Amino acid sequence: MSEQDVLVEVRDLKVHFPIKRGVLFDRTVGHVKAVDGVDLSIPRGKTYGLVGESGCGKSTLGRALLQLTPPTGGEVVFDGVELGKLPAGKLRALRRRMQMIFQDPLSSLDPRQNVESILTEGLQAHGIGGGRDERRKIIGETLDKVGLPRWALSRYPHEFSGGQRQRIGIARALVLGPELIVADEPVSALDVSIQAQVVNLLDELQDSLGLTYLVIAHDLAVVRHISDTVGVMYLGALVEEAPSDRLYTQPLHPYTRALMSAVPVPDPDLEDRRERILLAGDLPSPANPPSGCRFHTRCPWAQPTRCSDERPVLRDIGGSRVACHWAEQIASGELRPHEVAAQITRPTDEGEDPSVVSAPSEPGSYV
Amino acid sequence: MALLEVDDLSVTFARRGQRTVRAVDGVSFSVDAGEVVGLVGESGCGKSVTSLAIMGLLPKQPGLRVGGKAVFDGTDLLQLDDRSRRDIRGRDIAMIFQDPLSSLNPVVPIGVQVTEVLTRHRGMKGEAATKEAAQLLDRVGIPDPRRRLKEYPHQLSGGMRQRALIAMAVACQPRLLIADEPTTALDVTIQAQILELLKELVRDSGTALMMITHDLGVVAGLCDTVNVLYAGRVVETARRRPLFREPRHPYTVGLLGSVPRLDSGRGERLNPIPGSVRDVLPWPEGCAFAPRCTRRVDECVGEPPQLVLAHDGRSYRCVNPAPVPGATQAEAEDLYRATPTGDDAVAAVPTAAEPGSVPAQAVPTDPPAPPGLGSREEESS
């Protein structure tokens, strides 16, 4: 991918949040490793999709990329500039070129600001457009781009429907003329029929404005639909990264396979036919991740050697990057899935060791 | 005879000084014993209110009116007094809610909450109840059930909480289980586990399941019969395969077209339904879907479309349904007739919601609709 024009390059990015205990003296008793060593690069004009279950660190990664959450380690290079070392003023100026779209359009818009004021704020902060008239012109053009009528300017967010609100959120990001847009779950709060409108809009805007997207979502179908490259995250790290079509036709990592088989498809014939890989148990706590491969506690293909003590690194296998010791053997069918006992996962990690017990659920059972 | 027969159910909310809202507007469907029936629709279509009305769980407030019939095994649930309804609820009909954390009592251990059902309906006490509760938790796949019984809801993960809720629901082997978006709050891998569990329960115990969801994928894998709701009415009813293979109502067609599919390629354009759920025509004035419909004809406006009964138990509420591939002569004529008049009708009906002059539903003074897939009763008619 090196010969392509890379806009964003993330190297070994880490975001650790301290867990504090104590009343008078805060003791740090551990760290939640939300993002733990992620490398990725996004070519200009392309879409990178990030999928994973809740708590896998995908949103934190998006925020750390924009330096909204300060990273603990690693670097983010945006168009040749390393963001971590920039002084605050320079970073702020650069923010014009990287914008964010949030999940919940109502809570990310100020209910007391009308649309015009929402859109002007960014322009004023960055000193774009000389006078009021020029700013109005920019705003008007942006509204046209996202398909909102001009009379929207004097209205307030609550007067719009969910889809229209998300369009306001997109307009706010677009008004500054950014190059990179980080979209954190842009459609998951919307109704199915509205989702499709917003997905199409994002696609059109990319075509006409040459935008680069980082789309973070838990819905694999949406991500597949708009992404060129998809990265799958599990417990703070990428487990697989591949071109979108390849990932869906030939998933290599066991977690990707399980995730893919868990997504319901609106097609009864397909639903009845396909093999379902049911994962046992829940996502382990990121404060106390399993040793070795993080997925080995739930992996139906886990092997007694290597998986539990050696953390796999991303390696190239025919165009995909996979973090699995046994990816080739699994792909060729040499290794067969076996049953996994569910482990208890605590939603709050209160120091109690997770105990291993048997569970009746059968991974790899056929539907 | 059907186990549950809902006939012309309607729910209206009236508030002083505000418009009366018809959340459910004449919904009829039936659930046979051992059958899985889906109610599908977007937020505000009345699917949750329908289930709450059947269970008698709607908040008792002045202005609430529930009409129609919901006959369960010979008794009309809507006519029952509270006492006999409580006897049926939990024993014959049980419900699973969307958000397991807010439907479990946070200050009471799981065990007490499960045994409560057993004590109330099956008269079990003490050790026997605890033993049965542990067995129930084991049956729904909660590891180490004896220990879990002593724990509080916050100590369980989301998937485990939903399993506990299902354990409580199946405690008395109900004949009908109502699941209101049981997997919406869960991750996909956990969703797959829960759906598998529900399938097993239905298969093993012969319980009928009424599945309320917005996710067509869930419906495709689980339901025998599907009812598609729009703006408080059932617009299409069909068996699972025919519905997905040849949807007749334009709304169903639109829903299927707007779901991005895992097995389609990158960049294939979706065919969304224009407008939003707020752009509805009140049913008495025509088809509620007409403002957003691409197959709109003049007949759509004026009076509500009649329910058309088709072969093998299908029915749809549309005057100009989508043609079936390889359509008959009459249907082909239908299509021909639609084309020339289509444009006039398009011009006659408002298409986009303007905040100031939104036709039926959204008045600017209305409280904002919460985004998301949860239903909002007051929004629909």
Image (spheres, grey):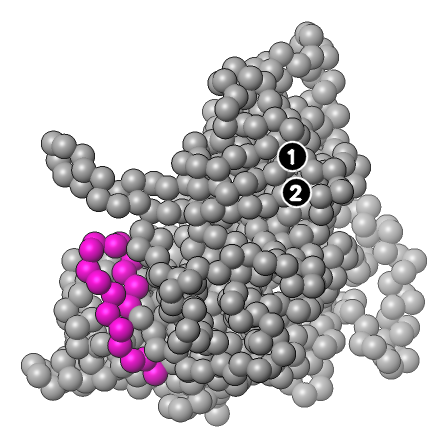
Instruction: State the image quarter where residue B106 is shown.
Output: bottom left
In screen coordinates, is B106 left or right of A225? left
Residue stretch rendered in magenta on the structure = A344-360
Callout 2 amino acid: Ile
Instruction: State the image quarter where residue A248 is shown.
Output: bottom right
Callout 1 amino acid: Leu
- For disc 1, the neighbor class at 10 Å (few under 14, some 14 to 19, many from 20) is many
In screen coordinates, is B220 left or right of A277? right
- The reply to whether dot 2 and dot 1 touch (C-beta < 8 Å) is yes
Q: Is residue A84 visible?
A: yes
Majority secondary structure of the magenta segment? loop
| Tag of residue B327 | none
- For disc 2, the neighbor class at 10 Å (few under 14, some 14 to 19, many from 20) is many
Q: Secondary structure at mark 1?
A: strand
Of residues B245 and B313, the one drawn nearer to the viewer in this rendering:
B245
Image x and y of residue B98, in percent:
39, 62
Q: Residue furthest top?
A: A131
Image x and y of residue B305, in percent:
69, 66
Label 2 and label 1: CA atoms lie apart by 10 Å
Of residues B143 and B313, the one drawn nearer to the viewer in this rendering:
B143
Residue that appears at 19% across and 60% down: A352
Image x and y of residue A298, in percent:
41, 70
| Tag of residue A42 | 2
